Image (cartoon, helix red, strand yellow):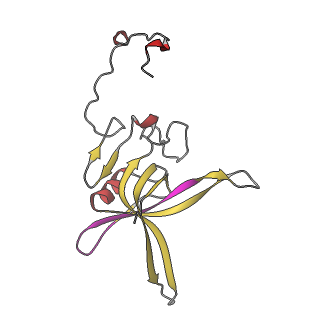
Amino acid sequence: MLNHIVLMGRLVRDPELRRTQSGVPVASFRIAVDRDFGNRETGEREADFIDVVAWRQTGEFVSKYFAKGRMAVVSGRLQMRSWTDNQGNKRTNAEVVADNVYFGDSKRDNDGSGAYNGNSYAGGNNGYNSRSYNDNSYAASNGGYPAPAAPAAPAASDFAMLEDDDSELPF
């Protein structure tokens, strides 16, 4: 069976970091995910609000580097949770248990207002300014956080102009 979900949305509020009785960190947060289509009557795009839970190092990472309005890309699995409330009613909630959480924008692109500015979409600046963290890896590149120095771009003179001749193509 396959249970894998990938979502991209903005945090509705700051993540809440708690610890279990045995000291395991767990962060919970909610993201607003825009639908791909607009409302038929108004034409406005609606959003779905999805609860996310991140455990251990992933949870600590989210609580440290994410805040309300930041774009997050969450990869994980969908899980149903059932409980009985104080009045004895059965309740059910769907939530995403995050395996990986990635920045969907860069710190420079996000002014804290949560507004989309045209540059922060799917990795911010076409992925060159993105970061990700999971329990096994941490990848970073020049996004406003401490990171190793990036290699210098080649000089313009290192590039050769290509001819627009298709006769040498092998297909």
Quadrant housing the N terminus: bottom left
* Looking at the image, residue 22 lies above or below residue 59: below
Residue 114 placed where, x, y %? 52, 48
Q: Quadrant of residue 39?
A: bottom right
How far across and how far down the image is residue 146, in percent? 28, 39
Figure disc tally: 0
117 or 136, which lies in front?
Answer: 136
Q: Is residue 95 magenta?
A: no
Q: Residue furthest bottom?
A: 88
Residue displayed at 48% across by 73% down: 93
* Above-or-below relation of 76 to 164: below
Q: Name the chief secondary structure element in magenta.
A: strand
Find residue 125 and report its horizontal and vertical position in percent: 45, 34
Residue at screen point 44% across, 11% down:
162
What range is drawn magenta here? 18-34
Q: Tell me if 49 is positioned left or right of 26 in this view.
A: right
Seen in the picture, residue 14 relative to 113 is either above or below; the reply is: below
Q: Quadrant of residue 52?
A: bottom left
Of residues 111 and 38, the one drawn nearer to the viewer in this rendering: 38
Q: Nearer the viewer, residue 100 or 87?
A: 100
Res 115 → quadrant: top right
> The C terminus is located in which quarter?
top left
Let me know if residue 24 is in the magenta part.
Answer: yes
> Which residue is farthest front?
171
- Does residue 133 appear left or right of residue 106 in this picture? left
**Residue at the spot x=37%, y=13% of the render?**
159
Q: Position of residue 34 (x, y in %)?
A: 57, 53
